[in-house]
Image (spheres, rainbow, N blue to C red):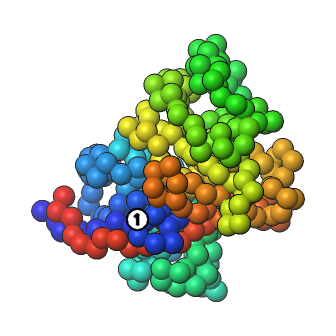
Amino acid sequence: MTLRRYLQLDVFADRPGAGNPLGVVLNADGLDSAAMQAFAAWTNLSETIFLLPPVEGADYRVRIFTPRQELPFAGHPSVGAAWVAIDAGLATPREGALVQDCAAGLLPVRVAGSGARALISVRAPRSRRIDPAELDQPDAIAAALAAVTAPLALGERAPALWDNGARWWVLELADAAAVRALQPDLPAIAALTRSCGAVGLGVYATADAGDHQLVVRAFCPADNIPEDPVTGSINASIGAQLAASGGFPGGATRYVASQGRELGRDGRVEVALDAEGEIWIGGRVQAVIRGRADW
């Protein structure tokens, strides 16, 4: 058996115990897809990543797995991957920049600061809105969506399906209190996401708070993750929806989202819109476990 370096991080976290946990396997050469998927199922974290030698034009390569499937892109694994590549000496930022290689392609990364106070931001793959009418069994999808939304106090924007490498239902609720108090119908959400190949469903609303302007929650019961603590890809899709329908809160080009409070892991995601219309998601990372994995 090969001993491999293993870390567990908290991403989008200003302290250990906040944000979203992430399993990280370094020197993952020699592990095939089945072994990676089995290890990700064993950790039972929302995502586990595997660091590999990069292709030309990238500083590091990462593969991202939930307990059930591999993802082309996910936000907190990408932020965590950049942090650990620097921490492990696998990559050195050039003028605060790196390039990540993942199944979604080559993604630019920005690095400001160092260590636990470093702010790591990744440019998300461009989100595209998907018309459920163009998918298989659109009537079944519509019925499943209605079952989820019927008891909810929705906001002004209609529920929509977005894909940025991870496919999400995005629902604006009436206000922050509605998001905080939501008791999700997890079987209904699982049925909806399975009907259209989505990872999960996210809800959000604007907030009048000093350190954040949005509140977000995300549910992935079909992946055996009832609620994900802090989720970069859903925050990127929410940012895309806002940019396409009236803009960010207050007409700004950046905002901070609070996610995870209901799970006792209140994290912060910094979301920015650049001059080219691309969405960036960023946050801080805390290393909690450093060890070896025998797999």
Against 21, residue 70 (above or below) is: above
Residue 66 in picture, x, y percent from top left? 40, 47
Up-down relation of residue 225 to residue 264 (above or below): above
Horizontally, residue 49 falls left or right of residue 58, namely left
Percent position of residue 17, x then y = 40, 65
Q: Where the N terminus falls, by quadrant?
A: bottom left
Amino acid type shown at disc 1: Gly
Q: Nearer the viewer, residue 3 or 208?
A: 208
Q: Residue at x 66, y 44 (%)?
A: 177
The quarter holding residue 150 reads: top right
Residue 286 appears in view: yes
Numbered disc 1: secondary structure: loop
Residue 168 visible? The answer is no
Query: Label 1: which residue?
Result: 17
Question: Across the whole image, how many numbered discs are drawn on residues?
Answer: 1
Q: Is residue 92 left or right of residue 257?
A: left
Residue at 54%, 61% in the rendered image: 267
Residue lying furthest left in this view? 1
Residue at horizontal 40%, vertical 60%? 22
The x, y position of residue 113, in whole percent, is: 58, 85
Question: As displayed, is residue 31 above or below residue 192?
Answer: below
Which image quadrant is residue 156 in?
top right
Specify the farthest residue to the top. 139
Q: Position of residue 193 (x, y in %)?
A: 53, 30
Residue at the location (65% across, 51% down)? Answer: 215
User: If the image is split into quadrants, where does the C terminus sit?
Assistant: bottom left
Q: Residues within 10 Å of mark 1 (few under 14, many from 20)?
A: some
With respect to residue 17, does 236 lie above or below? above
